[in-house]
Image (spheres, rainbow, N blue to C red):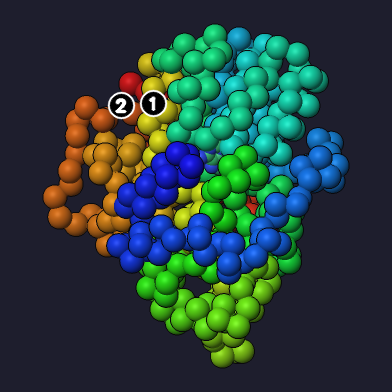
Amino acid sequence: MIFYMSVCSNLLLWKAPLTTRRAWRSWKLLRSSVVGTSFGPGSLDRSEEMSTVSAEKPLHTPVMLKEVLHFLDIQPGQVVLDMTFGGGGHTKAILNMVPEVTILALDRDPTAISLAQQLAKEHPGRVKPLLGRFSELEVLLSNTNIKPGSIDAVLLDAGCSSMQMDQAERGFSLSKDGPLDMRMDGERYPDMPCAADVVNTLDQQALASILTAYGEERHARKIASAIVEARRVNPITRTQQLASVVAGSFPAAVVYARKDRLHRPAHVATKTFQSLRIFVNDELNELHAGLLAAREVLRPGGRLCVITFHSLEDRLVKRFLRGDDLSNLDQSHFSSRKEGTGKKKINVDNISWLPLKRKVIIPEKDDVQENPRGRSAKLRAVVKS
Ligand SMILES: C[S@@+](CC[C@H](N)C(=O)[O-])C[C@H]1O[C@@H](n2cnc3c(N)ncnc32)[C@H](O)[C@@H]1O
């Protein structure tokens, strides 16, 4: 319960308007009456899920691998923190490339950490799995012999992994039918609200705010209204059910009219899914916590690479690295309108980074063709001064 309250207050600190806050307080009560006992993926057995995931399969093609290896410039014997182990793509490449490196492999997803544990057995003494969130890193590190301020390189590859997207039961994908879940922590915190809780309990205005804030969705009000209408008939508990509710609020001709960066048709519910995922996992507050933690754990001269996948994340990273004061996070920190306007509130104490490349780095065309999931990736590489 204490955890639930802290998650909610954290979630609500800056991301949700007052109406969301009120609605959220009652979500727990509503959860049982609206969604019923079959709600969410509670019945999913982790070991069953793991049996479909083999460490041999390429679970996540690492994004911008060459660039990450180049900018981290890891030397034999160094200690590296992979803050987002995922399918282990980057970690495996580092292990193969650099002898005697030690990698701390952090992830909030127990499925990812099971893979890290397998890898740790294959590379005794070289991989130390850490299950938890960015915001829990300090505590997790205090249980190891690694001292803050001593790590040589940190990688933060934000967002969710292909492994999470590809498993219908996790509820991240709009193209695969599954329970509307989206919790990166899986079943670690049974009280934590999942995407079905959000769409079935929050009021229309709160839903629209989430879609606007985290999906930059221009049709947020229309979609929120369609969700509220649909759930009056039946609770929305499946990913494809939500995708059809959103699609149903647009004329059939525009359902695939939006385009991604490869100019391929993108489903009209893509931004809805993104916004729910960010909200459920408190991703922007977590990203901020992750950047603060990276600054704490790196030694002076240590290197940080951050990969982001959408503009909200990239703006936050850019502003953090240039020393903007983000201590009172609110939505304006991620608004594109704030870019380049008005007085910048810069706290010189916060500037601890020297860029390795002044401009943001994007994937090469060939890499995007090979790994389309990385098409919107942006990499920022810096040294702690
Ligand atoms: C894009 S994937 C990383 C893929 C990985 N670099 C690879 O090559 O396989 C992001 C991973 O970060 C994890 N993650 C996201 N937010 C996190 C947080 N706040 N704390 C810890 N792990 C997080 C997700 O669970 C996911 O597994």
Three-letter code for the amino acid on which mark 2 is drawn: Ser
* Residue 328: percent from left, percent from top: 25, 44
Q: Which residue appears at 61% of the width and 26% of the height?
A: 130
The secondary element bearing badge 1 is classed as helix
Q: Is residue 230 above or below residue 273?
A: below
Q: Quadrant of residue 124?
A: top right
Tell me if 298 is positioned left or right of 46 in this view: left
- Quadrant in which the C terminus is drawn: top left
Whether residue 347 is visible, yes or no, is yes
* Residue 277: percent from left, percent from top: 54, 56
Q: Which residue appears at 45% of the width and 33% of the height?
A: 135
Q: Is residue 223 above or below residue 95?
A: below
Tell me if 47 is positioned left or right of 346 in this view: right
The secondary element bearing badge 2 is classed as loop
**Which residue position is annotated with label 1?**
295
Q: Nearer the viewer, residue 67 or 302?
A: 302
Q: Which mark is residue 352?
A: 2
Q: Is residue 218 above or below residue 359?
A: below
Q: Quadrant of residue 39?
A: bottom right
